[in-house]
Image (cartoon, grey):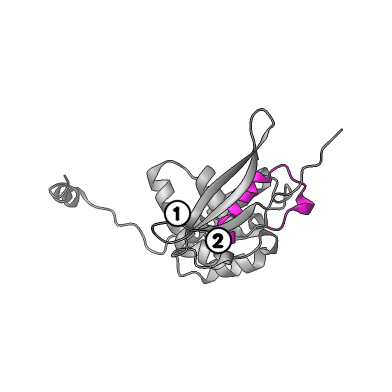
Amino acid sequence: MLVRTRYQYGSLRLRKRERGPDVWEFRYYETDSQGMRKRQSVILGDRGVLTTETQARKATQALLLRLNEESPRAEVEAASFGALLDRYIEQELSERYSTRKSHLSNIRVHIRPRWGEHPVDKLKPMAMEQWLHDLPLAPKSKTHVRGIMHQVFKCAERWGIIELGKNPVSLVRVKNGSKRLKRPRVLDVDEFFELLKFLG
């Protein structure tokens, strides 16, 4: 008989400690390799950082996405884009230092402040396109930001959070996306050798 997988919400509680501030503990079930469900728990943070239950709940979203990979989509509440970003950073972000640093900076400075609280099913192409248009960045930098968002949604397709072929960023355009605002400075031979004196 087929057992229908149901969406798991887990339980959240504020746990007191003898020393230091109280901490938010999230408890859930995880199925091991033998198919047995085991109770697990994770500390999300202390009350000094997550001051309200609402903030603590938001901190569980990335974990809930992973726990409910096999749940029917109809039962899953729309995840926030911030939860997708958290899972992307944890599982998919490049290990190459320069790429990782660049992506994390764009997520922290531009993407999360604007879209982190939005449910993924509410992000619309024209709204994102207008936002990119208004960002005070060079067109090429805007293209990089768009590329990160596109990749996060591609991961959401693979994870079964959105339907295949429903990536809204695929419809978002960046005008003159390959153009620079300034022409790169090219050194002549004498300038290059002068620069070498200051390099380690």
Could you tell me the amino acid type at mark 1?
Answer: Leu
Q: Position of residue 19 (x, y in %)?
A: 39, 57
User: Is residue 178 visible in the rendered structure shown here?
Assistant: no
Nearer the observer, 58 or 139: 58
**What is the residue that sits farthest to the right in this orientation?**
1
Q: Position of residue 147 (x, y in %)?
A: 54, 53
Nearer the observer, 121 or 189: 121
**Given this view, does label 2 or label 1 mark the residue nearer the observer?**
2
Label 2 residue SS = helix
Q: Is residue 97 above or below residue 1?
A: below
Nearer the observer, 82 or 133: 82
Label 1 residue SS = helix
Q: Is residue 135 above or below residue 161?
A: below
Q: Is residue 162 left or right of residue 112?
A: right
Labels 2 and 1: the sequence-earlier one = 2
The residue pinned by badge 1 equals: 104
Rate crowding at label 2 as few (under 14), some (14 to 19) or many (20 or more) other CA atoms within 10 Å.
many
Per the model, the C-alpha gap separating discs 2 and 1 is: 22 Å
Quarter of the image where the N terminus is located: top right
| Residue 47: numbered disc | none
Q: Is residue 130 above or below residue 93?
A: below
Quarter of the image where the C terminus is located: top left
Rate crowding at label 1 as few (under 14), some (14 to 19) or many (20 or more) other CA atoms within 10 Å.
some
Q: Position of residue 94 (x, y in %)?
A: 47, 43
What range of the chain is rendered magenta?
A: 57-78
The residue located at (72%, 42%) in the rendering is 70
The residue pinned by badge 2 equals: 56
Q: Is residue 200 left or right of residue 116?
A: left
**What is the residue that sits farthest to the top in this orientation?**
34
Q: Position of residue 189 (x, y in %)?
A: 19, 48
